[in-house]
Image (tube, rainbow, N blue to C red):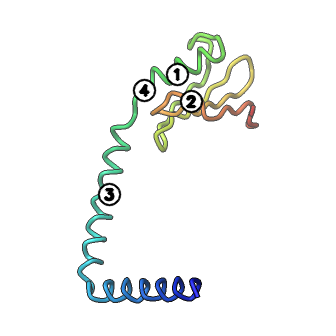
Amino acid sequence: MKKTIKIMALVLCLIFTASLMAACGNDNKTEINNTTDAVTTAQVETTAAALTIDEAQAKEIVWTDLSIQETAAENLTVELKDNSYIIAFQWSGFDYQYTVNGVTGVIDEILFDGSPLW
């Protein structure tokens, strides 16, 4: 008996919810789209402003990790992509590529001669 009452209450709740949603019409869809646009714009602005380290700091993180000076690196390139600095260079005859998170300053990936170190 209790199980039947619970099921009936659940069905009534579903019917009530569906009725409310139908009564709202398309106005909510417009509101949702406007909210989504606002959130997307805010995310883009936040992402651009979220970088807490600059290129020089990202390179310093790499040099500290390797215990070398920047002058020891050859063919150095730095690219900012998806809030991460991709720092590629040659040192001691080997190719290195570091990915440093521009927000946290954490090394996300190290490639050594094209292969991940971890």
What distance separates the C-alpha of mark 3 from that of mark 2?
31 Å
- The residue type indicated by label 4 comes to Ile
Quadrant, the C terminus: top right
Q: Nearer the viewer, mark 1 or mark 3?
A: 3
Distance, label 1 to label 3, CA atoms, is: 33 Å
Residue position for label 1: 59
Q: Earlier in the sequence, mark 3 or mark 2?
A: 3
- The CA distance from mark 1 to mark 2 is 7 Å
Q: Looking at the picture, how far across and down is residue 56, in whole percent?
A: 45, 21
Residue identified by numbered label 3: 39
Does the residue at mark 3 contact the one at mark 4 (Cβ under 8 Å)? no
Amino acid at dot 3: Val
Along the line of sight, the residue nearer the viewer: 12 or 18: 12
Pointers 1 and 2 in contact (CB under 8 A)? yes
- Which residue corresponds to mark 4? 53
| Residue at the image position 66 percent from the left and 16 percent from the top | 66
Which numbered mark, 4 or 2, is in the foreground of this view? Answer: 4
Q: Which mark is residue 87?
A: 2
Q: Are the residues at dot 4 and dot 1 in contact (C-beta closer than 8 Å)?
A: no
Q: Amino acid at mark 2?
A: Ile
Residue at 26% from the left image edge and 76% from the top image edge: 30
Q: Earlier in the sequence, mark 3 or mark 4?
A: 3
Find residue 63 and report its image quarter.
top right
Q: Quadrant of the N terminus?
A: bottom right
Neighbor class of circle 2 (other Cα within 10 Å; few <14, some 14-19, many 20+) is many
Q: Give the SS element for disc 4.
A: loop
Q: CA distance from mark 3 to mark 4?
A: 25 Å
The reply to whether the C-beta atoms of the residues labelled 1 and 3 are less than 8 Å apart is no
Residue ranking furthest to the front:
1
